[in-house]
Image (cartoon, rainbow, N blue to C red):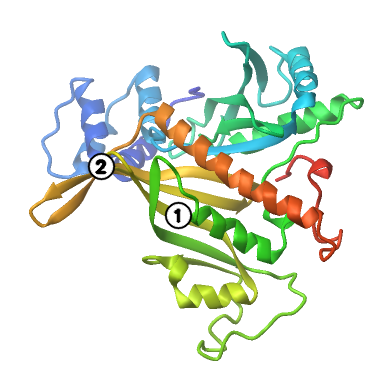
């Protein structure tokens, strides 16, 4: 994180008034011996703008503005196991070197059990609420994990450019080392027919997990299948104009998977692209809200926990007490669910590859997949 020059007072006031919570503003001023007599956060902000702070104080302010990322977003690429050594050699050859204008560097990390991972660091430059505090050093840890048929490169997404940075690095390696072509892939809906896209989510909803029990579907996102060869009119029970012009819809409610409206539109031109689910722990009062989603900009599959906590018994029933699980526990949950989702996806993809009813123009085979581009 860098401070190029000091921010303007009005910029400081705006940040304190609109983008920081009350506790952070109070603690920041108190740490500098500034006592404010006021009833609103704007009173604190107005007083705070009248002081000139040190570089360290402004950096502390920037960290408070960025906030702590409590919930983890995860993404991954898949690679054949026999290509891992080639990937490691390529990463080792550029380790410690700055490879682009963002000062991107790669570092290989060996582990005691013989496994390895690699770390990407880069400088993210973007406009901020304090516009001059705009450069932040980002770190991405990419872990190598084995599966039955392939290995995966798993990493968490903490910044808006993290996924793009991993993608660019892997693409750059393939471009510079012409003799090596990594057959990387991601979970991509476009590889599946519309029927399989529906089955992908349906079968995930029906999984019996030993630790977590699916209680309800909180949200579903549907997209129109623009490549449908046999578009049909919505059922008569629905208003024929209801879906006209709609390409994407985010649906909220209880037990959405049993909703007749959703059943009807997925029989026609729509398929799922996102689901948010409530899971209850089988042996404790813990709960999680877990989301799987296919993003379009850039194209990627993303799994994440969007909420967590525990139930507390009261006289009127149960109440939810929110709490953020430790990072290691979040990683474990996301990794497990992501693996289960991939197994279903891979099974459906294999079925389509072996089916003569699907033409080769409608799917992309696993070993022909390149790195997703933004």
- Tell which of 241 and 87 is nearer to you: 87
Q: Visible in this render: residue 298?
A: no
Of badges 2 and 1, nearer the viewer stands 2
Total number of numbered discs in the rendering: 2
Residue at the image point whose x is 34% and y is 21% from the top: 57
Which label was assigned to residue 324?
A: none
Within 10 Å of disc 1 (Cα), the crowding (few <14, some 14-19, many 20+) is many
Secondary element at image label 2: loop
Classify residue 114 as left or right of residue 7. right
Q: Is residue 307 above or below residue 69?
A: below
Residue at the image point whose x is 18% and y is 20% from the top: 33
Secondary element at image label 1: strand
Within 10 Å of disc 2 (Cα), the crowding (few <14, some 14-19, many 20+) is few
Q: CA distance from mark 2 to mark 1?
A: 20 Å
- Tell which of 302 and 101 is nearer to you: 302
- Tell which of 210 and 321 is nearer to you: 210
Residue tagged 1? 276
Residue tagged 2? 285
x, y percent for residue 184:
76, 36
x, y percent for residue 166:
66, 32
x, y percent for residue 330:
42, 34
């Amino acid at each position: 994180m860098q401070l190029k020059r000091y921010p303007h007072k009005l910029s400081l006031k705006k940040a304190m008034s609109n983008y920081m919570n009350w506790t952070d503003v109070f603690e920041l001023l108190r740490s500098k011996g500034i006592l404010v007599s006021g009833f609103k956060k704007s009173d604190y902000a107005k007083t705070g703008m009248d002081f000139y702070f040190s570089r360290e104080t402004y950096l502390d302010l920037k960290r408070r503005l960025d906030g702590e990322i409590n919930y983890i977003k995860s993404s991954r690429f898949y690679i054949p196991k026999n290509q891992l050594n080639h990937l490691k050699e390529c990463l080792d050859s550029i380790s410690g070197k700055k490879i682009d204008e963002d000062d991107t560097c790669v570092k290989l990390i060996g582990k005691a059990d013989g496994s390895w991972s690699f770390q990407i660091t880069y400088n993210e430059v973007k406009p901020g609420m304090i516009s001059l505090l705009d450069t932040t050093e980002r770190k991405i840890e990419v872990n190598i994990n084995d599966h039955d048929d392939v290995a995966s490169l798993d990493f968490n997404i903490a910044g808006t450019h993290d996924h793009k940075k991993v993608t660019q690095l892997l693409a750059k390696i393939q471009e510079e080392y012409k003799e090596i072509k990594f057959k990387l892939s991601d979970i991509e809906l476009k590889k599946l027919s519309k029927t399989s896209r529906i089955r992908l989510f349906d079968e995930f909803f029906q999984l019996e997990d030993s630790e977590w029990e699916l209680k309800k579907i909180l949200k579903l996102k549907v997209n129109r299948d623009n490549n449908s060869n046999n578009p049909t009119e919505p059922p008569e029970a629905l208003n024929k104009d209801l879906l006209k012009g709609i390409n994407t819809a985010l649906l909220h409610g209880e037990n959405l998977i049993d909703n007749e409206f959703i059943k009807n539109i997925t029989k026609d031109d729509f398929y799922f692209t996102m689901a948010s689910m409530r899971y209850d722990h089988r042996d404790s009062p813990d709960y999680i809200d877990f989301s799987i989603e296919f993003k379009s900009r850039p194209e990627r599959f993303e799994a994440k926990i969007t909420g967590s906590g525990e139930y507390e018994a009261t006289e009127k029933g149960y109440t939810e007490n929110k709490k953020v699980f430790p990072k290691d526990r979040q990683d474990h949950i996301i990794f497990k669910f992501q693996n289960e989702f991939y197994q279903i996806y891979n099974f459906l993809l294999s079925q389509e590859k072996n089916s003569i009813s699907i033409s080769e123009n409608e799917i992309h085979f696993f070993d022909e997949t390149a790195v997703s581009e933004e």
